Amino acid sequence: MRRFARALLALTAAAGCVCAGGGPEGARGPAGAPRPAQAAPSTGREREREAMVRDQLELRGIRDARVLAAMRAVPRHEFVPDGLRHLAYEDGPLPIGEGQTISQPYIVAFMAEALALAGGERVLEVGSGSGYAAAVLSRLAADVYGIELEPVLYERSVATLAALGYGNVHVRLGVGFAGWPEAAPFDAILISCAAERIPAPLWEQLRTGGRLVYPQGAAGGAQELVVVTKTPEGPRERALAPVRFVPMRRAP
């Protein structure tokens, strides 16, 4: 129960994330897929990331060693505006422009852990924002496909990911409801905004045996972060924590 309370506190802070809910625009593999080259972090930033992982993630119950390693490795300060880089490893979201935020580190780790990635998967992220979560996922899976609604955030995230060498992250501009059919099927899907039900095209693009994590519920009402596994018999759903997210959107 204490972990759920902490999750609600942390996940409530994600209300600024972008997510698309309109029409289209635009086999689990072996673990240990090669990771892309990383840019050298700024002096002192490694110690800040280590403290972030210890104090914000491990003490709140994040246990997946691969998720913790990814959070230690990805330079979050590279995904925030220059004037806020000194706050990059604080315990909270930060504004990134267009009225949106980069999610709190704990939120990213919590949702990544829920996907239970082994290393060889193809992952779809709906609502890529700054590109930070996609960078984390890129160290946990073989390929990450992200969809971003806001043009300014899309252009910035693409440039940042390219500069840092995340060659296994592919981002497109558009709404997320229709997913990315050309890249399907996906082994895992992460939706970073609330919906009362899983959009049918996204469910169709999830392979049998795959997992989908999303905030389930209406805007302004009760919501739960759930993980849904696609089985031959149908969806198998498990509630993870009470949350509060912005709803899926049809336009910027």
Image (cartoon, helix red, strand yellow):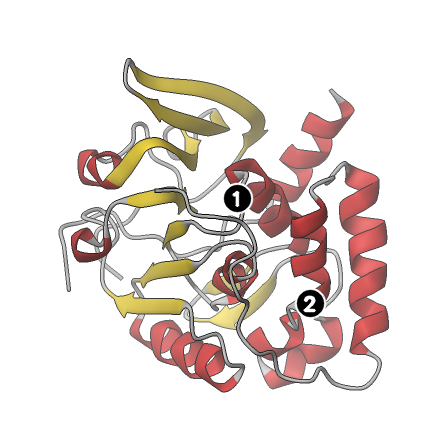
**In front here: 36 or 31?**
31
Dot 2 and dot 1 residues touching (CB under 8 Å): no
Q: Residue furthest top?
A: 233
State the image quarter where residue 53 is shown. bottom right
Count numbered badges in the picture: 2
Q: Is residue 106 left or right of residue 244?
A: right
**In front here: 15 or 130?**
130
The quadrant of the rendering that contains the C terminus is bottom left
State the image quarter where residue 154 is shown. bottom left
Q: Where residue 73 is drawn, which disc sits there? A: 2
Q: Is residue 8 left or right of residue 129?
A: right
Q: Mark 2 or 1, which is nearer the eye?
A: 1
| Residue 186 vertical placement versus 52 (above, below) | above
Picture coordinates of residue 232 (x, y %)?
28, 18
State the image quarter where residue 90 is shown. bottom right
Residue at position x 59%, y 51% in the image: 108
Residue at position x 39%, y 73% in the image: 153
Q: Is residue 56 left or right of residue 148?
A: right
Q: Amino acid at mark 1?
A: Leu
Residue at position x 51%, y 39% in the image: 115
> What residue sits right under mark 1 in the picture?
117
Q: Secondary structure at mark 1?
A: loop
Residue at position x 15%, y 61% in the image: 25
| Residue 61 vertical placement versus 107 (above, below) | above
Q: Residues within 10 Å of mark 1 (few under 14, many from 20)?
A: many
| Residue 43 vertical placement versus 26 (above, below) | below
